[in-house]
Amino acid sequence: MPRVMLGVGAALLVLFGCLALWLDRPSPDHESSLQALGKVDVTPGAIYAARFLDIEGKSQELGQWQHQLLIINFWATWCAPCKAEMPMLAKLQEAHGMHGVQIVGIAVDSRENVDKFAKQTPMGYPLLPDETGAIEFSKRLGNRLGLLPYTVVIAPGGNVIFSHVGIVTELMMIDLIIKNTENTAK
Amino acid sequence: MKPDDQGAPLNSSRSIRQAWSRGVFFTFAMALAHGAVAAVQEQELLPAEKAFSASARLVNDRLLELRFDIADGYYMYRDRFRFSINTRAISLPRQSWPIGRWKQDVNFGKVYTYRGSVRILLPVSSTGREGLANAGNPVNLVVTSQGCADLGVCYPPLHQTLALESGSSGWTMPRQASVSTFSQPAKPSHGLGNRLENGK
């Protein structure tokens, strides 16, 4: 009898483990992850009107990507987790750029640092340094504590449909891309 | 009793124990793996000034001790500390740095970090004959630092201002609000900040 109870106990333990993981799974409803973060305090018009200088000193307005699924990744050259996720973002841009996806990396960093980084590690998507304004912009997009990395996904038209503090996974991004580029096509 | 009679219960009991330990291992392994890939819950993270709490005291009229109390699960980079002062009458000739812990970072190579708490000694000296007396009041020492959380996020550079009163006999630190914190340097952005401030 004790052996049976031990066996049943072990099975229950595994079952509870699986149940806990299932209950704590990421929600497919992206708005729920948005609610967990700060409030988005910027209108679509203001998002698209925001301008940044690129590493060549040219002004880039976010509005040029208003008809695409815009993925804004806030990062910095001094941020190790940011640099860890960037190759995956570059891969996504390469694979999905032609399907209406545009990734933009806004750096809380100096132009010199970003330029040096871009020469060593070309990303395949625009890197826009703004040492002083980028954090403020990310806060307006829901990054309450100004943490990095921070990623927001903006649907064509300007609605923020996803925001995430910390490293994003490829699965998370592909899920969003598939759902939202399909919607765009319809 | 035959060996087989003895062996069967032993094997059976061993296999149950193995199943039990595998079950426990599996559960913990799954929980750990889940924790590693789970999204960072922003609510779990502290504001920078609480994660990296700064305080300062004057050891004597020429020596300032700066202390950071670093919350569990957070760390600061030794080489990201910077000091600046709003007067040329004063210099910060040498800083005494604890060595910290080093770690090999994939992106940055060998880096030194602090955890728990760190104490930095700042000798303060005058650069001219008039020196301390003419340094102006208050003297603002801006400490820039940067740290991250083990959960996989980093904080932007933190700028903390220490207000010091200078006088002919040396330095004093006002008791009230000697440390103020701001997360952005007080210089204008090239356009974006103003654009957002002006509305939507």
Image (spheres, rainbow, N blue to C red):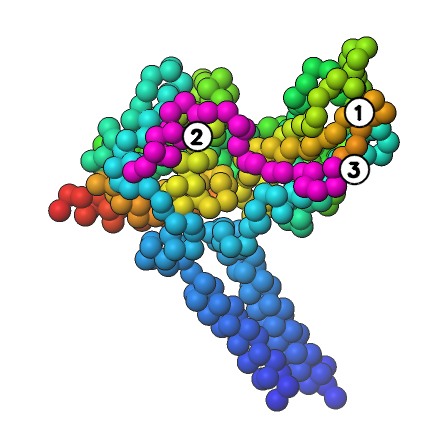
Answer whether residue A97 is visible to the viewer in this image.
no
Q: Which mark is residue A95?
A: none
A20 on left or right of B89: left
The answer to whether A173 is drawn above or below residue B8 in the figure is above
Tell me how many marks there are: 3
Q: Amino acid at mark 3?
A: Arg
Q: Is residue A152 magenta?
A: no
Mark 1, chain letter? Answer: B
Mark 2, chain letter? Answer: A
Q: Residue at x 50, y 44 (%)?
A: A145
Q: Secondary structure at mark 2?
A: loop
Question: Which residue position is annotated with label 3?
Answer: B57
Q: Amino acid at mark 2?
A: Gly
Q: Is residue B186 magenta?
A: yes
Q: Residue furthest left?
A: A186
Question: Which residue position is annotated with label 1?
Answer: B167
A40 on left or right of B102: left
Q: Position of residue A168 (x, y in %)?
A: 43, 44
State which tag comes first along the sequence, 1 or 3.
3
Q: Residue at x 63, y 34 (%)?
A: B160
Magenta segment boundaries in residue numbering: B174-200
